[in-house]
Image (tube, rainbow, N blue to C red):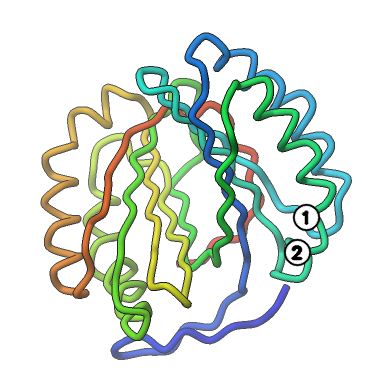
Amino acid sequence: MDRWRHRGASHEVWGWIVHARSTTIQANKSSIDAGVTHVRDEVLPALKQLDGFVGLSMMVDRESGMCIVTSAWVNEDAMRASADQVQQVRNRAAELLGGSPKVEEWEIALMHREHQTRPGAGCRVGWLQTDPGRIDDLIDTFKTVALPQIEELDGFCSASMMIDRATGRAVTSMSFDSKEAMDANRERATQIRTAGTKRAGATVVEVREFELALAHLSVPEMA
Protein backbone atom coordinates (compact mmCIF):
# COMPACT_ATOMS: atom_id res chain seq x y z
CA MET A 1 0.00 0.00 0.00
CA ASP A 2 1.12 3.55 -0.65
CA ARG A 3 2.37 5.64 2.24
CA TRP A 4 0.72 8.97 2.90
CA ARG A 5 1.19 11.85 5.31
CA HIS A 6 -1.75 13.88 6.57
CA ARG A 7 -0.89 17.26 8.03
CA GLY A 8 -3.55 18.11 10.55
CA ALA A 9 -4.02 21.40 12.33
CA SER A 10 -1.48 20.55 15.02
CA HIS A 11 0.15 17.26 14.11
CA GLU A 12 1.19 14.85 11.38
CA VAL A 13 -0.19 11.34 10.96
CA TRP A 14 1.51 8.63 8.91
CA GLY A 15 -0.65 5.91 7.47
CA TRP A 16 -1.74 4.22 4.26
CA ILE A 17 -3.69 5.47 1.26
CA VAL A 18 -6.52 3.04 0.60
CA HIS A 19 -9.09 3.68 -2.14
CA ALA A 20 -12.71 2.70 -2.57
CA ARG A 21 -15.27 2.43 -5.33
CA SER A 22 -18.93 2.89 -4.37
CA THR A 23 -21.86 1.79 -6.52
CA THR A 24 -25.27 3.25 -5.69
CA ILE A 25 -28.36 1.59 -7.14
CA GLN A 26 -31.98 2.65 -6.72
CA ALA A 27 -33.34 -0.89 -6.58
CA ASN A 28 -36.76 -2.45 -6.76
CA LYS A 29 -37.67 -3.06 -3.13
CA SER A 30 -38.80 -6.59 -3.91
CA SER A 31 -35.35 -7.38 -5.36
CA ILE A 32 -33.23 -6.32 -2.39
CA ASP A 33 -32.95 -9.75 -0.72
CA ALA A 34 -31.97 -11.39 -4.02
CA GLY A 35 -29.45 -8.60 -4.59
CA VAL A 36 -27.85 -9.07 -1.18
CA THR A 37 -27.58 -12.81 -1.78
CA HIS A 38 -25.99 -12.23 -5.20
CA VAL A 39 -23.44 -9.75 -3.86
CA ARG A 40 -22.55 -12.12 -1.00
CA ASP A 41 -22.37 -15.34 -3.02
CA GLU A 42 -21.23 -14.13 -6.45
CA VAL A 43 -19.74 -10.63 -6.35
CA LEU A 44 -17.64 -10.99 -3.19
CA PRO A 45 -15.95 -14.29 -4.24
CA ALA A 46 -15.21 -12.81 -7.69
CA LEU A 47 -13.60 -9.68 -6.25
CA LYS A 48 -11.52 -11.73 -3.82
CA GLN A 49 -9.67 -13.11 -6.84
CA LEU A 50 -8.48 -9.64 -7.90
CA ASP A 51 -5.12 -8.21 -6.84
CA GLY A 52 -5.33 -5.46 -4.26
CA PHE A 53 -8.90 -6.14 -3.11
CA VAL A 54 -9.30 -5.56 0.65
CA GLY A 55 -13.02 -5.84 1.25
CA LEU A 56 -16.63 -5.07 0.45
CA SER A 57 -19.68 -3.70 2.23
CA MET A 58 -23.33 -3.39 1.23
CA MET A 59 -25.88 -1.06 2.79
CA VAL A 60 -29.59 -1.19 1.98
CA ASP A 61 -32.55 1.05 2.72
CA ARG A 62 -35.59 -1.16 2.39
CA GLU A 63 -38.01 1.76 2.55
CA SER A 64 -36.54 3.75 -0.36
CA GLY A 65 -34.82 0.90 -2.23
CA MET A 66 -31.42 2.61 -2.20
CA CYS A 67 -28.49 0.15 -2.09
CA ILE A 68 -24.80 1.08 -1.85
CA VAL A 69 -22.05 -1.48 -2.47
CA THR A 70 -18.50 -0.32 -1.70
CA SER A 71 -15.32 -2.18 -2.58
CA ALA A 72 -11.96 -1.24 -1.05
CA TRP A 73 -8.52 -1.49 -2.67
CA VAL A 74 -4.96 -1.21 -1.39
CA ASN A 75 -4.23 1.75 -3.66
CA GLU A 76 -5.53 3.72 -6.62
CA ASP A 77 -3.62 1.62 -9.15
CA ALA A 78 -5.25 -1.58 -7.91
CA MET A 79 -8.68 0.03 -8.00
CA ARG A 80 -8.21 1.26 -11.57
CA ALA A 81 -6.75 -2.08 -12.73
CA SER A 82 -9.89 -3.84 -11.47
CA ALA A 83 -12.28 -1.63 -13.43
CA ASP A 84 -13.10 -3.98 -16.31
CA GLN A 85 -13.64 -7.07 -14.15
CA VAL A 86 -15.69 -5.13 -11.60
CA GLN A 87 -17.89 -3.63 -14.31
CA GLN A 88 -18.99 -7.09 -15.39
CA VAL A 89 -20.11 -8.20 -11.92
CA ARG A 90 -21.54 -4.75 -11.17
CA ASN A 91 -23.77 -4.81 -14.23
CA ARG A 92 -25.14 -8.21 -13.27
CA ALA A 93 -25.87 -7.02 -9.72
CA ALA A 94 -27.60 -3.90 -11.05
CA GLU A 95 -29.70 -6.05 -13.36
CA LEU A 96 -30.85 -8.20 -10.44
CA LEU A 97 -31.62 -5.19 -8.28
CA GLY A 98 -33.49 -3.48 -11.10
CA GLY A 99 -31.64 -0.13 -11.19
CA SER A 100 -28.86 1.74 -12.97
CA PRO A 101 -25.54 1.95 -11.10
CA LYS A 102 -23.97 5.26 -10.11
CA VAL A 103 -20.23 4.73 -9.61
CA GLU A 104 -17.94 6.97 -7.54
CA GLU A 105 -14.30 6.64 -6.49
CA TRP A 106 -12.84 7.77 -3.18
CA GLU A 107 -9.78 7.91 -0.97
CA ILE A 108 -10.40 6.37 2.46
CA ALA A 109 -9.17 9.02 4.89
CA LEU A 110 -10.20 7.32 8.12
CA MET A 111 -11.24 3.87 9.31
CA HIS A 112 -11.81 3.07 12.97
CA ARG A 113 -13.42 0.00 14.56
CA GLU A 114 -14.51 -0.30 18.17
CA HIS A 115 -15.71 -3.85 17.48
CA GLN A 116 -17.04 -5.89 14.60
CA THR A 117 -20.62 -5.43 13.48
CA ARG A 118 -23.24 -8.09 14.07
CA PRO A 119 -26.32 -9.15 12.08
CA GLY A 120 -28.93 -6.42 12.26
CA ALA A 121 -26.39 -3.58 12.42
CA GLY A 122 -27.43 -0.12 11.28
CA CYS A 123 -25.36 2.45 9.42
CA ARG A 124 -25.76 6.24 9.30
CA VAL A 125 -24.18 7.90 6.27
CA GLY A 126 -23.55 11.62 5.76
CA TRP A 127 -22.56 13.29 2.49
CA LEU A 128 -20.56 16.48 3.04
CA GLN A 129 -19.17 19.28 0.88
CA THR A 130 -16.30 21.64 1.61
CA ASP A 131 -13.84 23.75 -0.31
CA PRO A 132 -11.18 21.39 -1.74
CA GLY A 133 -8.52 23.46 -0.01
CA ARG A 134 -10.11 22.69 3.37
CA ILE A 135 -10.49 18.94 2.98
CA ASP A 136 -7.65 18.27 5.45
CA ASP A 137 -9.38 20.52 7.99
CA LEU A 138 -12.49 18.38 7.60
CA ILE A 139 -10.50 15.15 8.08
CA ASP A 140 -8.76 16.56 11.14
CA THR A 141 -12.02 17.78 12.70
CA PHE A 142 -13.71 14.43 12.15
CA LYS A 143 -10.73 12.55 13.59
CA THR A 144 -9.89 14.68 16.62
CA VAL A 145 -13.19 16.35 17.54
CA ALA A 146 -16.16 14.35 16.24
CA LEU A 147 -14.85 10.78 16.51
CA PRO A 148 -14.16 10.81 20.27
CA GLN A 149 -17.77 11.93 20.82
CA ILE A 150 -19.16 9.40 18.33
CA GLU A 151 -17.34 6.61 20.17
CA GLU A 152 -19.39 7.44 23.27
CA LEU A 153 -22.72 6.78 21.52
CA ASP A 154 -24.45 3.62 22.74
CA GLY A 155 -24.02 0.72 20.33
CA PHE A 156 -21.17 2.30 18.36
CA CYS A 157 -19.25 -0.19 16.19
CA SER A 158 -17.16 1.69 13.64
CA ALA A 159 -16.65 4.91 11.69
CA SER A 160 -15.08 5.83 8.38
CA MET A 161 -14.56 8.83 6.13
CA MET A 162 -14.05 8.76 2.37
CA ILE A 163 -13.02 11.86 0.43
CA ASP A 164 -12.62 13.23 -3.06
CA ARG A 165 -9.82 15.78 -2.78
CA ALA A 166 -10.45 17.28 -6.21
CA THR A 167 -14.06 18.24 -5.49
CA GLY A 168 -14.07 18.64 -1.69
CA ARG A 169 -16.73 15.96 -1.29
CA ALA A 170 -16.68 13.59 1.68
CA VAL A 171 -18.77 10.71 2.99
CA THR A 172 -18.87 9.71 6.64
CA SER A 173 -20.27 6.39 7.79
CA MET A 174 -20.99 5.22 11.33
CA SER A 175 -22.21 1.72 12.14
CA PHE A 176 -24.10 0.65 15.25
CA ASP A 177 -25.06 -2.66 16.83
CA SER A 178 -28.71 -2.32 15.83
CA LYS A 179 -31.26 -0.07 14.20
CA GLU A 180 -32.70 0.55 17.67
CA ALA A 181 -29.34 1.84 18.93
CA MET A 182 -29.02 4.06 15.86
CA ASP A 183 -32.54 5.43 16.36
CA ALA A 184 -31.81 6.21 20.01
CA ASN A 185 -28.66 8.25 19.31
CA ARG A 186 -29.97 10.18 16.27
CA GLU A 187 -30.43 13.49 18.09
CA ARG A 188 -26.98 13.40 19.71
CA ALA A 189 -25.36 12.37 16.41
CA THR A 190 -27.02 15.34 14.70
CA GLN A 191 -25.57 17.68 17.31
CA ILE A 192 -22.06 16.25 16.82
CA ARG A 193 -22.33 16.47 13.02
CA THR A 194 -23.66 20.04 13.06
CA ALA A 195 -20.92 21.30 15.36
CA GLY A 196 -18.18 19.45 13.47
CA THR A 197 -19.16 20.64 10.01
CA LYS A 198 -19.52 24.23 11.24
CA ARG A 199 -16.03 24.09 12.75
CA ALA A 200 -14.56 22.65 9.54
CA GLY A 201 -16.42 24.99 7.20
CA ALA A 202 -18.32 22.15 5.54
CA THR A 203 -21.94 21.69 4.47
CA VAL A 204 -24.09 18.65 5.14
CA VAL A 205 -25.60 17.65 1.80
CA GLU A 206 -27.60 14.63 2.93
CA VAL A 207 -27.91 12.09 5.76
CA ARG A 208 -29.46 8.64 5.34
CA GLU A 209 -29.75 5.53 7.50
CA PHE A 210 -29.28 1.98 6.22
CA GLU A 211 -29.25 -1.64 7.22
CA LEU A 212 -25.67 -2.93 7.00
CA ALA A 213 -26.39 -6.05 4.98
CA LEU A 214 -22.77 -7.12 4.34
CA ALA A 215 -19.49 -6.10 5.96
CA HIS A 216 -16.39 -7.95 4.79
CA LEU A 217 -13.65 -5.35 5.11
CA SER A 218 -9.95 -5.80 5.77
CA VAL A 219 -9.08 -2.12 5.58
CA PRO A 220 -6.46 -1.35 8.27
CA GLU A 221 -7.11 0.90 11.24
CA MET A 222 -6.62 4.49 10.08
CA ALA A 223 -7.48 6.78 12.99
Amino acid on which disc 2 is placed: Arg
Image quadrant where one finds the N terminus: bottom right
Is 107 situated left or right of 52 in this image? left
Can you give x and y, in whole percent of width and height, for residue 161 in the image? 43, 60
Amino acid on which disc 1 is placed: Ala
Q: Is residue 103 above or below residue 139?
A: above
Q: Is residue 100 above or below residue 207?
A: above
Image quadrant where one finds the C terminus: bottom left
What residue is drawn where x is 84% and y is 37%? 46
The CA span between labels 1 and 2 is 5 Å
Is the residue under label 2 in contact with that under label 1 (CB below 8 Å)?
yes
Give the residue at the far top of this rendering.
30
Q: Is residue 30 above or below residue 170?
A: above
Q: How many marks?
A: 2
Q: Nearer the viewer, residue 178 or 108?
A: 108
What residue is drawn where x is 23% and y is 56%? 204
Is 157 situated left or right of 218 in this image? left
Is 39 situated left or right of 164 in this image? right
What residue is drawn where x is 47% and y is 77%? 166
Can you give x and y, in whole percent of width and height, for residue 201 in the image? 19, 74
Residue at which label 2 appears = 80
Give the residue at the far front of this rendering.
100
Secondary structure of the residue carrying tag 2 is helix
Give the crowd class for mark 2: few <14, some 14-19, many >=20 residues within 10 Å.
Answer: some
Can you give x and y, in whole percent of width and height, for residue 68 in the image? 52, 37
Can you give x and y, in whole percent of width and height, for residue 17 in the image? 61, 73
Residue at which label 1 appears = 83
Q: Nearer the viewer, residue 205 or 15?
A: 205
Q: Residue 11's quadrant in the figure? A: bottom left
Give the crowd class for mark 1: few <14, some 14-19, many >=20 residues within 10 Å.
Answer: few
